[in-house]
């Protein structure tokens, strides 16, 4: 019997540039399928993009719910209708409740724009500049109840240059995010990498490193 292609649901809140890279990878390589794109914001630009590509979309507007638990329950119910193998957070700007995280335990992934465990939370590029680090990056990780923690599936690295601003760092890093996130999703969804005792094992690819001369 032929093995079926793993399916993913992508959650966004905004422009959706990672979503577009995730979709492009699936169209080129076919090693996972995007079953749906969900947003907590009706005006998220990524929704239009998904629709243009014939991907089903849904909005669960957090403003329509009285509290976080009610919102997360509705979001989880909506995600469950797509019966996906993986739930992929791509610029989804809501803090998720422990109940939501445990419902999707082991199949909820996120991309965070820092080399975790350094710089969890917001404004990660400014945090990196303020700390004076020479290397910065992004991390794809499994989501656990603790914000911006969880087993690390992949990382990508950029060098901090003397004239960098938070914006220039973010721009350079985003190019790597677009290469890293699809490949990490594909590797994890297809079982080429897996987590054992909190550590990723299997056929790991070398971390992506931004080379200045290619910018
Ligand atoms: C990215 O920087 C990602 O690392 C972070 O949110 C941003 C999303 O950007 N989690 P986009 O919506 O994918 O363009």
Image (spheres, rainbow, N blue to C red):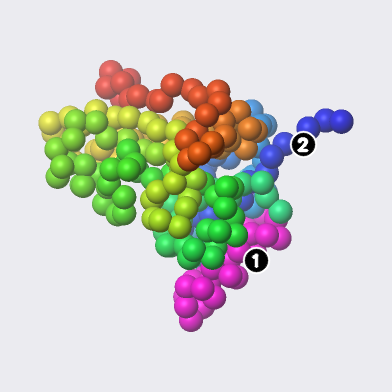
* Residue 70 at x, y percent in the picture: 54, 75
The quarter of the image holding the N terminus is top right
Q: Nearer the viewer, residue 111 or 141?
A: 141
Q: Residue furthest top?
A: 213
Q: In which quadrant of the rendered view does residue 33 lie?
A: top right
Query: Relative to 200, is 42 above or below?
Result: below
Residue located at (20% from left, 47% from top): 126
Residue located at (64% from left, 52% from top): 36
**Disc 2 designates what residue?**
4
Local secondary structure at mark 2: loop
Sequence order check: which comes first, mark 1 or mark 2? 2
The quarter of the image holding the C terminus is top left
Query: Relative to 75, is 124 above or below?
Result: above
Q: Residue furthest right?
A: 1
Answer left or right for 163 relative to 187.
Answer: left
Residue 72 is covered by the magenta coloring: yes
Residue located at (47% from left, 53% from top): 144
Q: Which mark is residue 41?
A: none
* Residue 211 at x, y percent in the picture: 31, 21
Does residue 154 appear in this view? yes
**Disc 1 designates what residue?**
77
Query: Relative to 147, is 177 above or below?
Result: above
Magenta span of residues: 54-82
Answer left or right for 167 relative to 130.
Answer: right
Residue located at (21% from left, 47% from top): 127
């Amino acid at each position: 019997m032929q093995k079926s292609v793993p399916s993913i649901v992508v959650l966004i809140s905004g422009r959706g540039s990672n979503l577009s890279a995730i979709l492009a990878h699936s169209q080129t390589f076919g090693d996972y399928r995007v079953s749906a794109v969900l947003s907590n914001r009706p005006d998220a630009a990524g929704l239009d993009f998904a629709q243009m590509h014939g991907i089903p979309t849904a909005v669960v507007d957090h403003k329509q719910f009285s509290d976080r638990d009610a919102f997360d329950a509705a979001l989880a119910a909506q995600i469950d209708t797509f019966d996906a193998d993986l739930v992929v957070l791509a610029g989804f700007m809501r803090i998720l409740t422990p109940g939501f995280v445990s419902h999707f335990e082991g199949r909820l992934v996120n991309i965070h724009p820092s080399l975790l465990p350094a710089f969890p939370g917001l404004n990660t590029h400014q945090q990196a500049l303020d700390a004076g680090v020479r290397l910065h990056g992004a991390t794809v990780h499994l989501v656990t109840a603790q914000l911006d923690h969880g087993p690390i599936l992949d990382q990508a690295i950029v060098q901090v240059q003397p004239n960098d601003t938070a914006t220039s760092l973010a721009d350079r890093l985003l190019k790597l995010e677009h290469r890293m996130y699809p490949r990490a999703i594909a590797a994890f969804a297809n079982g080429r990498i897996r987590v054992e005792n909190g550590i990723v094992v299997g056929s790991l690819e070398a971390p992506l490193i931004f080379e200045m001369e290619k910018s």
